[in-house]
Amino acid sequence: MATGETGKQRSQRIQIDYYRHRGRIFWWRWACIAAGLAGAVAYAALVISPGGSPHLSTGTLSIAHASFEKDCQQCHQDFTPLSADAFRLDPSATIQHAKQACNSCHPVGDHHRTTLLPRWQSFEQDCAQCHREHLGRANELTAIGNDTCNQCHANLSSVCSSSYTLSVRDDITHFDLDRHGEFQSLKSDRGRVLFDHHQHMLPGQVDAGVKGAFTIGMLEALRRDSYRDPGQGDADLVTLNCGDCHQPAGNPDSQWSLSSDAELGRYMKPISFQQHCSACHSMNPPGRGEDTLPLPHAAPWSEMRLLLTAKISGGRAEGSARTPRENRRQTPQVGEGFGVPAASANVISAAEIDAAIQDVRVQCLKCHDADSITEESIAAALSGKSAPLIPGRWLRHGLFDHAAHREVDCRFCHGAAYPSEEVSTSPATDHQQVMVGGIDTCTPCHRTIDTQPTDNPLFGKQPVWASDACVLCHRYHTSTEAQP
Amino acid sequence: MMSICRRMSSSICLVVISGSWTYAQTPQYVGRSSCASATCHGGPVGNGPSWNHALTKWLATDPHAGAGLLLRDEDSRVIVTQLEPAAADSPLVFDQVLRSRCISCHATATTAECQSPQALADSLLARGVSCESCHGAAKQWITAHLQTSWSGDERFQQQTGVLDTESIAGRAAVCARCHVGSRREDGLVRDMNHDLIAAGHPVLRFDLLIYSENLPAHWNETSETEQTFQQSALRVRSVGRAACLGAAAALSGQRAADHQTNSSVSWPELSDYDCFACHQSLSISQYRLPANKKNRSPLRISDGLPIWNSWHTIGQKELSKKNLAALAPNRIDATVMSTAALRVSQQYLRQAMTNQTASYDPEAAIDQLRRVLGAAPPRDWHEAAIQYLYADAAQRDLDLAPTKVSRLVEPLLRFDPNESATLQSPARFDPLQFQTTMLQALQMSEFSADVARGSNLQSGRRTVASGRTNE
């Protein structure tokens, strides 16, 4: 390619021994090298001098890891090249070392790793992508900003393999109905226990104009004080409030979550027949009085037969129940007199027990479906292997903390459980709906700081702003153990 | 008329209204288990009001609860095989007999269950004579009965299906459905006839007062309605006997009417008549009527012409000779009998209502009995038994419990000194001893002394005021 400059012209312009001359560039370069070396020596001196260690780190460790402050190798490792003859760092080895270090104390499972594209899989394994250390003692490692989550969740399909079908929406960026969507768990009730909150919240558990209101005196004597409001006598109506059945507990699934999620008050204790139902709904064998026990709840049918036999037989033996063919009379029948005692004192036929079992079964079916009271279902329930019929958590994907919301009236989120004139008491349909408020009950408080608060008398003294961070409700990590 | 119907069970009411043997509708049961919730009628005995543990108590103490399973015991086997010899070798035939003849009273059964050709499940028998047998099939009223507006006589309208167990006449009519018999109630045939008695079933001699007292109460015995039962034994007995006569007449008439359309319905039905008129011991040498007393047997039993329903008719002064004659066994015209029985039934269902609001004077009743007995001993066991019942009731109203007649006279009426129900013959009965003892028990001097000793005698109770306290 012609440049327009001849060889002669070039030889005249560049001296033939040009490489022997030390020009300004040469001296400038050496000056820089010298300055650099001097600076390095000075910095090295500063670093190794007392008080110079901060220069080796971006900051102190958070308070959770403060004990490792002087023990860098807990997390960091010596330089590990990509290969023996290379000088590049092997990022995967570094990440793996750090992850092992983290996991030695925080064993956590993957976050949908197998669904991610390969390059996002390494991201998913890198703890430091979300939990940044050396930002000072006050640094909250678990305070993950929404932007961190949004790296993937703003366009989730772009980080997932094409073969994966999303189970959540593709573009969650904010916590509101439009950009987050309604809670998935609330779309159907998994409950299998028929119950009517409306009826139970009414005084005496009956509607206006209905007879049979339950009074304190109708409860078993030992249970009356538990349901007696101040000043109530035995003739007063049983009046239930939420706390009679819903008592604070920790997260029933906390083994797959943060340990703090197990704190008392976050969730409610599972409903227990013995604790919450039996005072009014005891299952009574024939002739049961105050001095005898009711039938146990969820006893296997084979055991129930034996118990009923014992109850009936016992009643007859002690004279509180009539024996078959008993013919003694209090008032004589004309011609026959007072009659004679039964010849066979205490014979109980299988049919008699069958009928008693049928009475019990019908009582079971008042609340349970037929599948729940089979011998197999009862055995599974007693062994603890089956899921509870009333879930301990209704929001399966997000967490909730009842204690944190203690100032809010229950009705704000659970309004459907309260009596209202529009709600019929029969038949009970509570098992067909989830009586937990949707996202609209959260967003009045859990919102971006620049939005206007909503006023509602049911909030009580609860502050009307709260974080809308994803991690307030969602936990990134899964368990290393298989979940049921 | 409607006020009468409100206090009567369904088809008896139909009899009164329509003047014919109308069938009541088939019941729609919900089953006793529907009542058994601890918050309804299955609560622990002793807690809360009586209604809350009515079923719990009934199951343990009430003979009706075990009435169905009696059909599986030895006595039942004997009766059924006597009735149908083929049942001895065929469980299916046995069950068919139970279905067609027994379970309408011994269980809470539907028409279909009584007519089914299938084997009879023990579970059906184990239901017993449960809630709906006496209170009415609840399908129609189970929801309504929860309302506070569910009170008063309006509940007992025929169309509601609920039976009146609160008034004396109503309760008597309910009991009479089985304890006297019926062929229309609930669309069921509850007919314990001569065939069954011959096979070994005990004779039905229902008395509302005796049966009520022997029934363990699963209701509130201090309630206002129960007070009407406790105010006057004479009233309960008079109302009960009139209602049962009305039911017995209805049963006789229905038997006659059914025989005309179905020849398999036996008629004349011998159980309509005094058993002892025919069942006399031929081995007794005294069984020769005195020449001058053709109508009197030394055995003190009605003889010659059996009296129609003597247990119910003796002492019923309002029963006209015309009607009684029409019901006599020598008039074997089913149509005539059906018509006469209808008239008697209507008359005594009304009489039961009248008796319910009548005044009763126990001392006057005792005076009258003394006069009758002073004139002559009772003609037979039945007459003596009814005299005893009224004397006992009068003395109860004078606060003598157990009454003197109950202690002294009742044993004289027993068929068997061992009090078994198997021997059903009044052969031992001595009218003269009865007369003497009864008059002794009714002596006013002793009577007054007993009254004076009784600290709980209430002066106002000697003459029981008419009408119910809540009316």
Image (spheres, coloured by chain):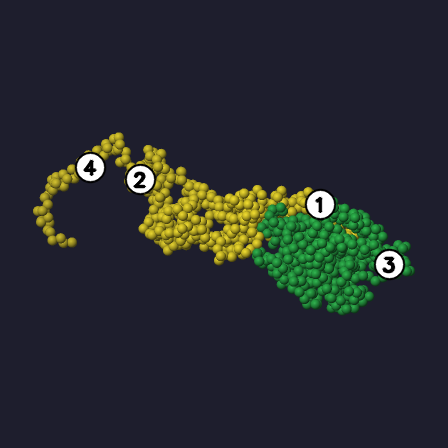
Out of A235 and A419, give the one closest to the viewer: A235
Front label number (1 vs 2): 1
Out of B457 and B340, give the one closest to the viewer: B457
Label 1 lies in what chain? B
Rendered yellow, the chain in question is: A
Any part of residue B267 in sight = no
Q: Quickly name the residue at label 3.
A: B296
- Looking at numbered disc 4 in the image, what kind of residue is underneath it? Gly
Horizontal side, residue B409 vs residue A482: left or right = right
- Looking at numbered disc 2 in the image, what kind of residue is underneath it? Leu
Any part of residue B394 in sight = yes
Out of A301 and B177, give the one closest to the viewer: B177
Residue B338, image quadrant: bottom right
Q: Quickly name the residue at label 1.
A: B455
Label 4 lies in what chain? A
Element type where label 2 sits in the image: loop
* Residue B409 image point, x, y percent: 80, 50
Front label number (2 vs 4): 2
* Residue B262 image point, x, y percent: 74, 67
Residue A135, numbered circle: 2
Element type where label 3 sits in the image: loop
Q: Residue at x 37, y 47 (%)?
A: A463
* Residue A33 image point, x, y percent: 18, 37
Front label number (4 vs 1): 1
Element type where label 4 sits in the image: helix
Of the numbered discs 2 and 4, the one sitting upstream in the chain is 4
